[in-house]
Amino acid sequence: MTQKFGLSAALTSPFSTDGTIDIEHMIAHARRCLAQGCNSVTLFGTTGEGCSIGSREREAVLGAFLEAGISPSNIVVGVLVDSIEDAADQASQALSAGVRNILLAPPSYFKNVSDDGLFAWFSAVFAKIGAGARDILVYNIPSVTMVALSVELVGRLRAAFPGIVTGVKDSSGTWSYTEQLLKEHGDLIILIGDERDLARGVRLGGQGAISGVANFLTQDVRAMAVDGRDDKRIEDLVVELLKFPVTPAVKVLLSHTTGENVWLDVRAPLIALSAEDRARIEGAFDRLFHQKAA
């Protein structure tokens, strides 16, 4: 059996005061996550504000990571765009560099699209990528995209594209869906995006997680994602995080635990949390983990 996916940190993207990506800090953070137990890091996912990062920036960041000696086998790249051409171009750029997987979200501008329409979109993306298409994790995050990937659609995609569609990141937060996905497609790489369901999902055959919380609680999340070990502290922390816009809240806690203010900025249309909200989420973290910031 091939090695399980394990834990990937859904890497946050640090921004300089001029709004550009602070690649040096991003690489240093990736090294830290890998050293603390992550099997890979995911660039340009939801927590990384990937939908707000353009193709030229992506190319520069990925090139810098590889030049810094981070193995492409330790990198997953998120693709969160609507057009077939852009999705194929961004995926091809990363696949040609040898990255481990592509995390591919469905198109999300048009709502209430059918499974047939989604199947046609994914099919067209794979056709445009061509012979280099491989190791695609389809991304189910309907709270953000408003587009759900049904268990039946996953079945159609895997049957039509063996070796291309190799897994699903399930961030539905709906246990009944996760359970059905594991039951019907457990031989695929099923990744649990909601840490509240992570340990029990892994115990049922899930292969790990791409996790935002892994940015600052790497070893704790690894115990859930790899060993299937319950951790009520993390489950309770996720409940607290969901009271705020999640990506800015994750960045607050990364800043809180590292002492690095570079993590606090986000790109429009997101806005940074207020000082009051920062204090609330930091206080919740400290109460749960009985520790103070670095």
Image (tube, rainbow, N blue to C red):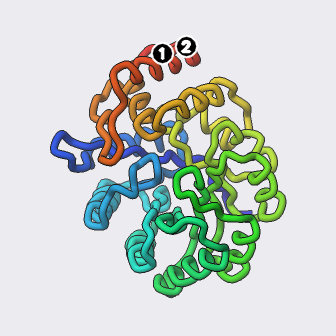
* Residue 112 location (% of width, % of height): 60, 66
Give me the residue at 35% from left, 43% from top.
270
What amino acid does circle 2 point to?
A: Arg
| Residue drawn 44% across the image and 14% down it | 292
- State left or right for residue 200 relative to residue 47: right
Per the image, the residue denoted by label 2 is 287
Which mark is drawn over residue 79? none
Q: Element type at marker 2?
A: helix
Of 245 and 138, the residue lying toward us: 245
What residue is pinned by disc 1? 283
Mark 2 Cα within 10 Å, few/some/many (few <14, many 20+)?
A: few
Q: Residue at x 77, y 64 (%)?
A: 185
Name above or below for residue 150 compared with residue 242: below
x and y percent of residue 283 in the render?
48, 15
* Residue at the image point whose x is 67% and y is 45% from the top: 173
Placement of the C terminus among the 4 image quadrants: top left
Return the residue found at the far right.
183
Give amino acid for label 1.
Gly
